[in-house]
Amino acid sequence: MRSRLGWGFWASAGWIGLVLLAAVLADVLPLARYDETLAGPPRSGPSAAHPFGTDGLGRDVLSRVVHGARVSLGVGVGAVLLGLGIGAPLGILAGYRRRATDAVIMAVNDVAQAFPALVFALAVVAFAGANLRNVLIVLGVLGVPSWVRLIRGATLTYADREFVLAARVLGTRDRRILWREIVPNVAVPAASYAFIGMAVVVVAEGSLAFLGLSVQAPTPTWGGLINEGRTLLESAPHVVLAPSVVMFLTVLSFNLVGDRLRSLTDVRESGLEPVRQAAAAPLPSAEHEVRADCLLQAEDLRTHFVTPRGVVKAVDGVSFTLRRGRTLAIVGESGSGKSMLIRSILGLLPGSSVRGGHVYLSGDDLTGYSPARMRSVLGPRLGTVFQDPMTALNPVRTIGTQVTEPLRVHLGMNRRQARAEAVRLLASVGIPDPERTLRRHPHQLSGGMRQRVTIAMALSCGPDVLFADEPTTALDVTIQDQVLRLLHRLREERDMAVVLVSHDLSVVARWADEVIVMYAGKVVERGPAAEVFARPRMPYTEALLQAAPRLTDPVHHRLRVIPGRPPDLVDLPRGCAFQPRCPYARDRCAREAPPLTGSYACWYPRDHAEVLKERADSGGR
Ligand SMILES: Nc1ncnc2c1ncn2[C@@H]1O[C@H](COP(=O)(O)OP(=O)(O)OP(=O)(O)O)[C@@H](O)[C@H]1O
């Protein structure tokens, strides 16, 4: 940490510490009184008795600068705490709740930010007087809009992170998510900006003092000292220079410390600003038969985003059924809607989306559930394992606090019981030293171990269905197989159903019972995995398979890529969405969209005999 922060950071922190210490100990330091006139000869330069010299009334400048630090730093710290105290809750609320709450808070914030600061300061001083408390209030309140904006931005960054989604899929309440997942992460950038904020406030106080709008004489402030010394600029420049240099160094140090901390924890990495808020009306739904023998059933599920460019139909009329003890795989190119389908089932969609259709869990329609009721299902009945275990775990909390949380929240265990159960869970997913692992932070574990931890968390409340969204993508190839084996074993042991999203068709072929193939938000082929992969009917499925590497491929074998690009979901081609890329497309494909009848959506499905003949002709794949 020390080397990453650099000597400038430590020198600045040292200076700030020194000034703060001097300000706190000002009364006990062996200094002349700051208001004692003729403590020395007027306007005398620096000497052993008066290291910063004396001012026009013979007062000790060092003593006045040290006492001035009390006001300037006191206002700096106080105003930042006040601004943060009001701005942080509002910013977190806006960034986490979004929609109307965000719109209202940000509208008010914009108006507040546009209000002229000087007019506000003048008004407060005129009505309430220029004293320390009022200056602190003025500067604190003026800082609120910037804090709201900053904290909202940081919250937006974290609100869609997988560890927050993970907490939500475990059914954690919003308030707890805010305290345990968002606040600790937002606190890091907030702390760094607090230093920059203090620099701004110290300068602002100096400017107010210069205008006579701050604490009045005889109490010294740095801005007031500079103002007083103005008239002595020619005869005794040290009177202005001493407070100016101290103030300059302090402001510079605050900025340097804040900047270094910020560069370590830059919050601008994700660009998660949501698109324009959609009208919240749900999409209309058709009536469908509910299958009693199914554990999980999706009917005509749709997730649309209203964006400035138009409506993105990320999931468009997806239906499937899944029974206990089975694994359903969802495959498709990047952007085909796999993750949105899972988030739609779990009711964990971004604020800018609207959902239609139904999701039945053992016959109960989850789409009608209130958020509170949904929380009782997420975790205990629906578990989720995310793609990247590093982002699915909160970096600032130990594994122990994260694994025990769902056990305490949902199963009502006390701390000791939850810890014992967490040890058992970690052991069951193959973590060698569970006791020690509980005390560690995510970054202290390998990728494979982290993913085992997230699997343990997903299983902690004994879910009926486990969703695994690309659970092995972020892992080493050798670890991938171990994790998939583990999921398979756990499915058998616990008689769960598994929904597996994967890019890797060899994984799907090996571990899934059924598969649905997605293209542009729709299911274009479905059926038993062995059947679909052995005899794909839809040319897109065939192309996906041809683009997938196989262990039996010769070393320098060139994979076939699917020609063209995935479609723009705002502007889909007419007819079949795959037709512009399909080598077998005919006129009808560009005119009419093929419905999903039976197991595929294609006007001219591949004929297996024909495929075998083509393969024989081309001498290979
Ligand atoms: N907030 C959003 N606003 C608008 N469109 C979105 C939003 N989130 C996702 N989409 C769009 O929804 C579509 C489906 O996204 P999704 O993440 O489900 O794809 P995916 O198949 O899981 O891709 P990948 O394999 O890369 O994860 C994408 O085209 C994406 O651009």
Image (tube, helix red, strand yellow):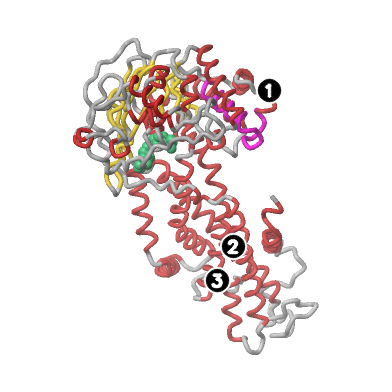
Q: Which quadrant of the figure has residue 38?
A: bottom right
**Dot label at residue 206:** 3
Image region (quadrant) for ligand 1: top left
Q: Is residue 610 above or below residue 351?
A: above
Rounded to the nearest angstrom, the CA distance separating label 2 from label 3 is 16 Å
- The residue singled out by tag 2 in the image is 255
- Residue 141's spot in the image, x, y percent? 45, 58
Q: Is residue 80 above or below residue 352?
A: below
Rounded to the nearest angstrom, the CA distance separating label 3 from label 1 is 60 Å
Q: Is residue 621 visible?
A: no
Q: Nearer the viewer, residue 312 or 614?
A: 614
Q: Is residue 511 above or below residue 94?
A: above
Q: Which quadrant of the figure has residue 423?
A: top right
Q: Is residue 503 visible?
A: yes
Q: Say what amino acid the circle numbered 2 marks.
A: Asn
For the stretch drawn in magenta, what is the main secondary structure? helix
**Dot label at residue 462:** none
The earlier-in-sequence mark between 2 and 3 is 3
**Dot label at residue 432:** 1
Give me the residue at 59% from left, 23% from top.
Answer: 482
Q: Of discs 3 and 1, which sits in the foreground?
A: 1
- Residue 287's spot in the image, x, y percent? 22, 21
Q: Is residue 470 magenta?
A: no
Q: Residues within 10 Å of mark 3 (few under 14, many from 20)?
A: many
Q: Which residues are magenta?
A: 438-460
Q: Are marks 2 and 3 in contact (CB under 8 Å)?
A: no
- Residue 565's spot in the image, x, y percent? 36, 42
